[in-house]
């Protein structure tokens, strides 16, 4: 996983840095392209005798758009395309689902004009589940709302260009049901680690 993240970031940096010579002054918008590693914590309520129900880890690209209302206060919208996750029961694959998890956060940037620019954020996640491929008679709720928190930093590489490292924790859950009712609640609740590049304009 680490090697793939490094390779993707190196490719992005190689494409971005030569463009810095023509850069203009920083503006209120910051767009980032990142490689994101999603690692669900997979809590089950209640526990069942057949084993733990889990969604698998996933590496995928994401893009986010940040707008600075002031030098310190910004809002970030995180987007990606639908991601397929295998679902296992007691370690054995029993199906798959797709999910798309747009997240909106409000951030505080501690040192907005320094080369090293740490920030924290908090906001709301909406996850839409689709394309369920599950055992006959088993369904899941179609959506989830939950809080999200983050911490990270931007490091200025050149005028307008930044290296970004970001860590989020997001509360995502869905009920798994059969024809009678709820079997359990799967608390996916993933850690999201991402690395990428940003362009400020």
Image: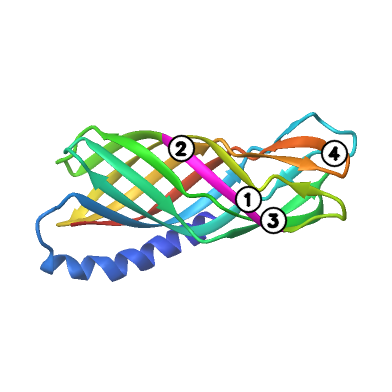
> What is the distance, in whole Å, between disc 4 and disc 1 at their CAs?
18 Å
User: Chief secondary structure of the magenta span?
Assistant: strand
Report the front residue among 1 and 152.
Answer: 152
What secondary structure is found at the residue carrying circle 2? strand
Mark 4 / mark 2, whichever is N-terminal? 4
**Which label is found at residue 124?**
2
Find the magenta span and give its range.
123-131
Q: Residue at x 10, y 61 (%)?
A: 24
What secondary structure is found at the residue carrying circle 4? loop
> What is the distance, in whole Å, between disc 3 and disc 4 at their CAs?
19 Å
Report the front residue among 20 and 10.
Answer: 20
Q: Quadrant of the C terminus?
A: bottom left
Count residues near mark 2 (Cα–Cα under 10 Å), then give few for <14, some for 14-19, many for 20+.
Answer: some
Q: Nearer the viewer, mark 2 or mark 1?
A: 2
Q: Nearer the viewer, mark 3 or mark 4?
A: 3
**Which label is found at residue 161?**
none
On the image, numbered disc 3 is attached to which residue? Answer: 97
Mark 2 / mark 1, whichever is N-terminal? 1
Q: Residue at x 56, y 35 (%)?
A: 171
Mark 3 / mark 4, whichever is N-terminal? 4
CB within 8 Å, label 3 to label 2: no
35 within the magenta span: no
Q: Quadrant of residue 179?
A: top right
Is 21 on the left or on the right of 48, as rendered? left
- Work out which residue is located at the far left of the displayed protein and give it: 25
What secondary structure is found at the residue carrying circle 1? loop
> What is the distance, in whole Å, between disc 1 and disc 3 at their CAs?
13 Å
> What is the distance, in whole Å, between disc 3 and disc 2 at their CAs?
22 Å
Q: Give the percent coordinates (x, y) of residue 54.
A: 73, 44
> What is the distance, in whole Å, between disc 2 and disc 1 at their CAs?
21 Å
């Amino acid at each position: 996983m680490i090697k793939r993240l490094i390779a993707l970031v190196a490719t992005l940096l190689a494409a971005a840095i030569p463009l810095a010579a023509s850069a203009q002054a920083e503006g209120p918008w910051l767009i980032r392209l990142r490689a994101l590693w999603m690692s669900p914590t997979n809590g089950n309520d209640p526990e069942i005798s057949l084993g733990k129900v889990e969604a698998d880890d996933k590496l995928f690209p994401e893009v986010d758009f940040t707008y600075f209302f002031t030098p310190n206060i910004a809002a970030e919208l995180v987007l990606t395309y639908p991601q397929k996750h295998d679902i296992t029961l007691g370690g054995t694959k029993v199906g798959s689902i797709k999910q798309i998890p747009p997240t909106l956060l409000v951030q505080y940037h501690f040192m907005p004009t320094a080369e090293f620019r740490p920030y924290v954020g908090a906001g709301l996640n909406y996850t839409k589940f689709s394309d369920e491929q599950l055992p006959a008679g088993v369904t899941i709720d179609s959506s989830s709302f939950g809080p999200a928190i983050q911490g990270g930093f931007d490091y200025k590489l050149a005028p307008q260009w930044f290296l970004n490292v970001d860590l989020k924790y997001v509360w995502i859950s869905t009920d798994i049901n059969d024809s009678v009712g709820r079997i359990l609640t799967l608390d996916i609740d993933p850690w999201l680690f991402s690395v990428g590049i940003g362009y400020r304009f």
